[in-house]
Image (cartoon, rainbow, N blue to C red):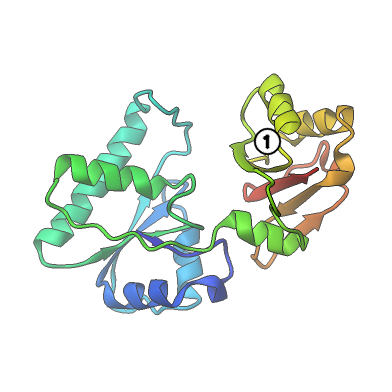
Amino acid sequence: MVGVGPGDPELLTLKAVRILEKCPSWLAPAAKIGGDSTALTIVGGAVSSEGKDILVHHFPMKKVHSGTAPDPEIQQAWDKAAEWVYDQLKQGLDVALPTLGDPAIYCTGFYVYQTLLRIHPDAKVEIVPGISAIGATAAAAKMSLCLGDEELLVIPAVFENQRLRETLQQFRSLVFMKVYKSMDRIVPILKEMDLLANAVLVECTSMGEERVHHDVEGALGRKLHYFSTLIVRK
């Protein structure tokens, strides 16, 4: 599993490039059936896919709740991906699974990894870290995430309003992921808590259409890109 960073091919690590070049088979995640793989597009800016056996595999964009069995459609996607990977391994072929950002942070690839080891415990897996969208977003906003003894919280924006209020009260530095559908809920909470001036919204971090919004109130009523992240620093 190879983290390929948030969007800019120049943010691939040297190790990621080396392993992608070496592996003859790639498993590339796609959000839509028959759609393109964003991770594969990023890789294409730095590594040639010529001669590679590439499976662009659809993973349903449905919520996965910790401690709860996933939707059967999601589990089926994980199972099929894991079986394809193991079939390649049995043929003596190494497989790379390029994944957005860093594999340790909200990554579909980790479910494939866990499924593979459950089905085939003898499979050998290496995880290559990548530059996270969190760090790249802070760089785009030209701000630190935490300094000194400050805590940093990373939280999905899908939580209900009271939980968002509680975390904003408790922590000095927060990163809200997946805010593209939640800004109409979050902005009024920030305004209520007098935190609008402390927030920065970044769309498409490190991609060609990157946009940095210091006036997050302007996001109200707007259709945001799926790759949107909000930082709040008190």
Q: Is residue 134 left or right of residue 77?
A: right
The local crowd at label 1, few if under 14, some if 14 to 19, many if 20 or more residues have their Cα within 10 Å, is some
Residue in the image at 47% along x and 65% along y:
4
144 versus 9 height, above or below? above
Classify mark 1: helix, strand or loop: loop
| Relative horizontal placement of residue 197, taking residue 160 as reference (left or right) | right
Instruction: List x then y, in percent, for residue 198.
Output: 84, 45
Query: Where is the N terminus found, in terms of image quarters?
Result: bottom left
Q: How many marks?
A: 1
Q: Nearer the viewer, residue 6 or 169?
A: 169
Which amino acid, by three-letter code, is at mark 1? Answer: Lys
Give the percent coordinates (x, y) of residue 60: 42, 39
Q: Residue at x 34, y 24 (%)?
A: 69
Residue 154 sits in quarter? top right
Q: Position of residue 211 (x, y in %)?
A: 76, 59
Residue at 68%, 48% in the rendered image: 149
Tell me, yes or no, if residue 177 can be seen here: no
Up-down relation of residue 93 to residue 87 (above or below)? below
Residue 120 visible in the displayed image: yes
The residue carrying mark 1 is: 181
Picture quadrant of residue 209: bottom right
Residue 175 position within the rendered picture, expressed as x and y whole percent measured from the top left:
66, 44
